[in-house]
Amino acid sequence: MDKQGKEAEDIFVQRCRSSGLRLTPQRLAVYESLSGDKSHPSADKVFRKVRKMIPNISFDTVNRTLLSFVSCGILKAVESYGRVKRFDPGLGEHHHFQCLKCGKIIDFEYPDFASFRVPETIRRKFVVMGRRIVLTGICDSCRK
């Protein structure tokens, strides 16, 4: 495991402990299956990958684990626009482009979005805890 991978695992362990989640073999397998995965996998894709490591694991266990990870800040759920929920292990500040044809979700960074000003009407009514910009369109592969 490289230095960045070790740091990510340390953060994972720390967040599990601070959220009261025990470090079970199933949770570790789900985490490992997501480590470095930039495809924004669905619960089914994660399940198929984890099942290779733990053949008797259930889909429900994987799905509940993913949702637990989202609630304690280990993962982010990605906007799905009528499709299955997808998961993003990348916790750094970034945004998404989603292809409306093939469903591919691509991470991108754009520093100017950090200065996006939340409208006063929203700030008066809600407590904004974060922001993510999602661009939709057709990716290069589908455009060809």
Image (cartoon, grey):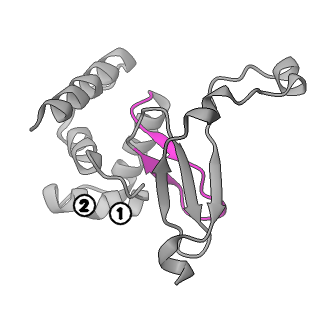
Residue extent of the magenta highlight = 73-88
Question: Toward which corner of the image does residue 43 lie, by quadrant?
Answer: bottom left
In this view, 132 is above or below 36:
above
Residue 111 pos. (x, y %): 55, 33
Residue 86 pos. (x, y %): 48, 54
Q: Amino acid at mark 2?
A: Lys
Q: Are marks 2 and 1 in contact (CB under 8 Å)?
A: yes
Q: Which residue is mark 1?
A: 45
Q: Residue at x 14, y 56 (%)?
A: 53
Mark 1 surroundings: few (<14), some (14-19) or many (≥20) residues within 10 A: few
Q: Nearer the viewer, residue 54 or 71?
A: 71
Residue 31 pos. (x, y %): 27, 42
Q: Amino acid at mark 1?
A: Lys
Q: Nearer the viewer, residue 103 or 139?
A: 139
Quarter of the picture holding the N terminus: top left
Question: Going by the picture, which residue comes out furthest to the left?
Answer: 1
Q: Residue at x 55, y 40 (%)?
A: 110
Q: Residue at x 60, y 57 (%)?
A: 80
Q: Which residue is mark 2?
A: 49
Q: Residue at x 42, y 34 (%)?
A: 91
Any magenta on residue 62? no
Residue 61 pos. (x, y %): 34, 49
Instruction: Tell me the chief SS of the magenta region.
Output: loop
In this view, 125 is above or below 71:
above
Any magenta on residue 83? yes
Question: Toward which corner of the image does residue 84 lie, by quadrant?
Answer: bottom right
Left-right relation of 115 to 78:
right
Compute the Cα span from label 2 to label 1: 6 Å
Q: Nearer the viewer, residue 107 or 89?
A: 107
